[in-house]
Structures are given as structure tokens and as C-alpha cells.
Amino acid sequence: MVVVSTATRHDAHDVADLMQEMDVFYGEQRRESSASKVDGINSILFGDQPCASALLAWHDSLLVGFASYSFLWPAVMSEKSLYLKGIYVRQGHRQSGVGRLLMARLSELALEQRCSSIEWTTDQDNQDAQNFYERLGASRNPTKLFYHVTGDAVRMIAASMGQR
């Protein structure tokens, strides 16, 4: 039986191990040490100013999936939304209901927190994920584009503010 719980500091090593698998799945070329991942997890989820939360799916003592999320504001009018940043289910446990359990718990949290919506993105070529989300009843939002900047682009934008 799979049990979904909220991540605690005690879970950081298990989350780091699962994230290593996720990095490989998504083709990440850079490798991060387990210790560095654990430090990052502890800072992001359990630091002085946590910026995310995570749900964990356990099959007995094996971490088989997780979902990371944050609350965003504003959403509709002056309400907030729950933003699902990532969901991952361990190879060998996919299509066993783990993802559905994680999404159900996220939906419960959104209702408890009076969120107006749950939002997320997925890779355009990840058809399995798209099929999963559509089976849940989610619809695509064709009016939105997703943007991001990294590395040098972030530094360039920050530097441009000093040139005013």
C-alpha cells in the first residue's frame, strides 16, 4: 500500500536519491553530489525561509514518488493558487496509482488553503504526463506561454537594473 505524507527534514536523503533518478530520467547532464542535493533540499524545504513544500509517496519504506509545490499570489482576483513545480514517480511504480494519489493530496491541500486553482507545466514531448493530466480532467491553457531565464541571462537582467 502507498502512503502519501508531507516531507520532513528526516526524509532529505531519500528525496535526494529519488531526485538523482529524476535527473537521469530528464536527461540532466550535470551531476550533483548526494550531499549537495541534501543540503539544497534542507535549505529549500526546511530552511529559515522555505520556498517550497513536498509530498512524498511511500511504498513500505521505499520512496516511490514526490510532488513539489508552492503557493502563488495573486491568482484569480485576490486569491492564491497552488503551483505544482514537479511530480515524479520512480521507474517501476508508474501506472500504479502513485501519481493519482499525489495529485489527489495536492487537490485536498488546494481546497484546504482556499486556492482558486492548481497550475503546472509539462514538457511538450512528455506525452505520458500529458495523457495522465488529461485523464485527471485537467485542460491545457493555450493562452499562456512559459518563460524562464538562467545563469548569464539572470545576471544580465540584474545588471541592467543598475544602469538606470
Image (cartoon, rainbow, N blue to C red):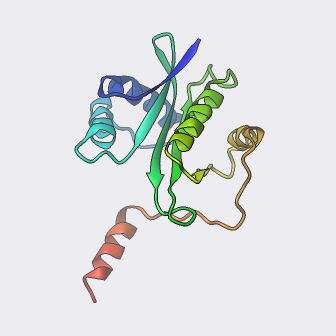
**Count of marks placed on residues:** 0
View extreme (bottom): residue: 164
Quarter of the rendering containing residue 7: top left
Residue for point 53% across, 65% down: 147
Q: State whether residue 125 is above or below residue 55.
A: below
Height in image: 110 above or below 56? Answer: below
Residue 35 coordinates in the image, percent (x, y): 27, 31
Up-down relation of residue 4 to residue 86 (above or below): above
Closest to the observer, 84 or 18: 84
Compare residues 104 and 67 and report the one nearer the observer: 104
Residue 53 horizontal/vertical position (percent): 41, 39
Q: Is residue 93 left or right of residue 161?
A: right
- Closer to the camera in the image, 101 or 27: 101
The quadrant the N terminus occupies is: top right
Q: Residue shown at 46%/50% (left/top)?
A: 71
**120 vs 154, nearest the viewer:** 120
Quadrant placement of the C terminus: bottom left
Q: At x 51% / y 59%, what residue is drawn?
A: 79
| Residue 65 left/right relative to 160 | right
Q: Position of residue 152 (x, y in %)?
A: 36, 67
Residue at image x 36%, y 67%? 154
Relative image position of residue 97 (x, y in whole percent)? 67, 23
Q: Is residue 123 above or below residue 77?
A: above
